[in-house]
């Protein structure tokens, strides 16, 4: 089975025309937006998660062949779904399994013929039960947490295996193995395609929340590609998060995750300029931040805190990150931000969910806090201690942060070298350009 980029690369070798390239970009864009819904619909119909994804990929390959000559259909998601369903019918016919599944899928196709052409655009506020069922299926307890997250990011988030690997800070081959094993495990366990009963939520919820947040982070800062952000992906994660929070209104971490995503997304309008170039936090026009999302996020964080207090626990990992986002949201400027409170939140996060990325982000907060506990020198010592962590070896994050700290300390030659190293490691074109510009600004 190939993924969208694999199919795109294969097709690129046979054609180089401008029209073909435009069609391929359209296919890739449609796939990013629609793949989760397509696979979810096919899983519901076939009752086979692995087969559903294979059928979707076959439809994608057919689109790559046809759309350059026929043009992109008015409803590309419906087109891909219909092609995949026909492939399913053909497969069942070949295997002489012309049973009730064929009748069901044929009825579905007939109904869609009357509405697909002029179907209204997808409503982001409508609850899509198929996608939610897909998330819960991919996060079934028979899978390890790592497998749950990898599979969901791949199928629901539409990320390539390379992108998932970068999100995990692990080799691509490791992610490929996890996904293959996960599909086999789901098939062997005959896992139903459904949202679990309420009494099963507790065992499933942590994995689902983790996946939703990783999907959001990929939308917040894409690990690869030409665009720095993928707002469509972030919006989908927020929608799923709100649905989950409504399903489990007494779960503080579900509320905390919603708060985190809304407070973070509030800054989206100011994070890029008109050409898509990233704008750093200290240069953002805070008047462009979405005040409605900030209000919603703060309300969700208050609910999370109240629920945690009622249970006699402290804020969870998502609520702590939402606390950090809230500090930014209410501050009039970077200098006026409550950095000691942010450092304290990172201290709590490091105890609950330690990771090298959390430690690196804490170092950034320390660099902004007042001396003597804070400042660039104190932060640089923390970052240097992280230099030997193998999990960060292939990431641009550590040299990027180190370059910033060295620049603030006036160590321009070292800062330039770190920015250049970070640019070499960065997979996102926009981020790479920013890092190279920073290196150039340090002189030669």
Image: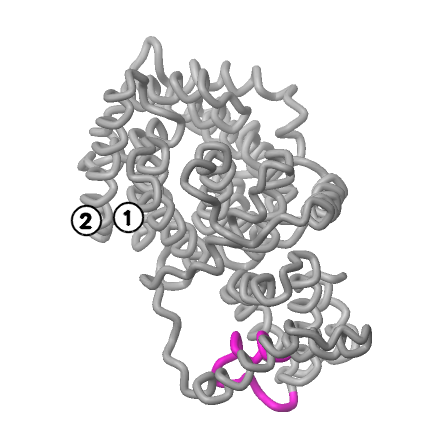
Give how far across and how far down residue 356 sits, in percent: 55, 24
Looking at the image, can residue 223 be seen? yes
Q: Residues within 10 Å of mark 2 (few under 14, many from 20)?
A: some
Outermost residue to the front? 100
Q: The residue tagged with tag 2: helix, strand or loop?
A: helix
Task: Tell which of 254 and 353 is nearer to you.
Answer: 254
Q: Compute the Cα span from label 1 to label 2.
A: 7 Å
Could you tell me which residue is drawn at 33 percent across and 34 percent down?
256
Vertical placement of residue 8 versus 18, above or below: above
Quadrant where the N terminus sits is: bottom right
What's drawn in magenta, residue-wise? 69-83
Residue 337 drawn in magenta: no
Q: In the image, 260: left or right of 187?
A: left
Image mark for residue 266:
1
Task: Tell which of 426 and 439 is nearer to you.
Answer: 426
Vertical placement of residue 353 versus 77, above or below: above
Vertical placement of residue 382 versus 194, above or below: above
Could you tell me which residue is drawn at 38 percent across and 32 percent down?
318
Q: The residue tagged with tag 1: helix, strand or loop?
A: loop
Which residue is disc 2 drawn over? 291
Q: In the image, 266: left or right of 23?
A: left
Give how far across and how far down residue 199 sits, in percent: 43, 36
Vertical placement of residue 284 versus 300, above or below: below
Asked whether the residues under the numbered discs 1 and 2 touch, taking CB atoms below 8 Å apart as contact, a structural biologist would say yes
Outermost residue to the right? 95
Could you tell me which residue is drawn at 51 percent across and 37 percent down?
207
Task: Tell which of 214 and 10 is nearer to you.
Answer: 214
Q: Residues within 10 Å of mark 1 (few under 14, many from 20)?
A: many
Q: Earlier in the sequence, mark 1 or mark 2?
A: 1
């Amino acid at each position: 089975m190939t993924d969208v980029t694999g199919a795109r690369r294969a097709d690129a070798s046979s054609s180089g025309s401008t029209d073909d390239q435009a069609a391929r970009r359209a296919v890739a864009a449609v796939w990013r937006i629609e793949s989760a819904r397509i696979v979810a619909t096919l899983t519901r119909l076939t009752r086979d998660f692995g087969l559903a994804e294979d059928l979707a990929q076959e439809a994608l390959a057919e689109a790559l062949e046809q759309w350059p000559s026929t043009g992109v259909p008015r409803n590309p998601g419906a087109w891909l779904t219909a092609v995949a369903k026909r492939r399913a019918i053909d497969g069942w016919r070949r295997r002489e399994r012309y049973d009730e599944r064929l009748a069901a899928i044929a009825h579905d196709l007939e109904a869609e013929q009357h509405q697909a052409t002029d179907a209204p655009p997808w409503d982001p506020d409508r609850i899509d039960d198929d996608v939610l069922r897909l998330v819960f299926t991919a996060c079934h307890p028979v899978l390890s947490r790592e497998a749950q997250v990898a599979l969901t990011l791949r199928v629901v988030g539409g990320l390539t295996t390379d992108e998932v690997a970068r999100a995990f800070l692990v080799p691509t081959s490791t992610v490929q193995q996890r996904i293959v094993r996960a599909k086999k495990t789901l098939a062997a366990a005959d896992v139903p395609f459904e949202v679990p009963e309420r009494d099963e939520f507790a065992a499933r919820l942590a994995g689902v929340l983790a996946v939703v947040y990783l999907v959001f982070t990929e939308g917040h800062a894409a690990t690869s590609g030409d665009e720095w952000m993928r707002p469509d992906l972030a919006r989908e994660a927020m929608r799923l998060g709100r649905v989950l929070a409504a399903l489990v209104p007494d779960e503080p971490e579900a509320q905390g995750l919603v708060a985190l995503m809304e407070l973070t997304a509030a800054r989206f309008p100011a994070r890029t300029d008109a050409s898509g170039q990233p704008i750093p936090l200290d240069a953002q026009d805070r008047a462009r931040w979405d005040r409605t999302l900030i209000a919603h996020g703060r309300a969700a964080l208050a609910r999370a805190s109240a629920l945690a207090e009622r249970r006699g626990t402290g804020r969870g990992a998502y609520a702590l990150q939402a606390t950090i986002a809230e500090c930014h949201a209410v501050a009039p400027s970077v200098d006026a931000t409550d950095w000691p409170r942010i450092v304290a939140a990172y201290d709590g996060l490091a105890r609950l969910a330690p990771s090298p990325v959390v430690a690196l982000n804490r170092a950034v907060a320390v660099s902004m806090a007042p001396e003597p506990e804070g400042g660039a020198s104190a932060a640089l010592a923390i970052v240097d201690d992280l230099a030997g962590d193998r999990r960060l070896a292939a990431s641009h994050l550590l040299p990027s942060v180190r370059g910033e700290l060295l620049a603030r300390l006036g160590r321009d030659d070292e800062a330039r070298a770190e920015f250049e190293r970070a640019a070499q490691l960065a997979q996102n074109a926009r981020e790479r350009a920013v890092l190279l510009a920073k290196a150039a600004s340090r002189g030669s």
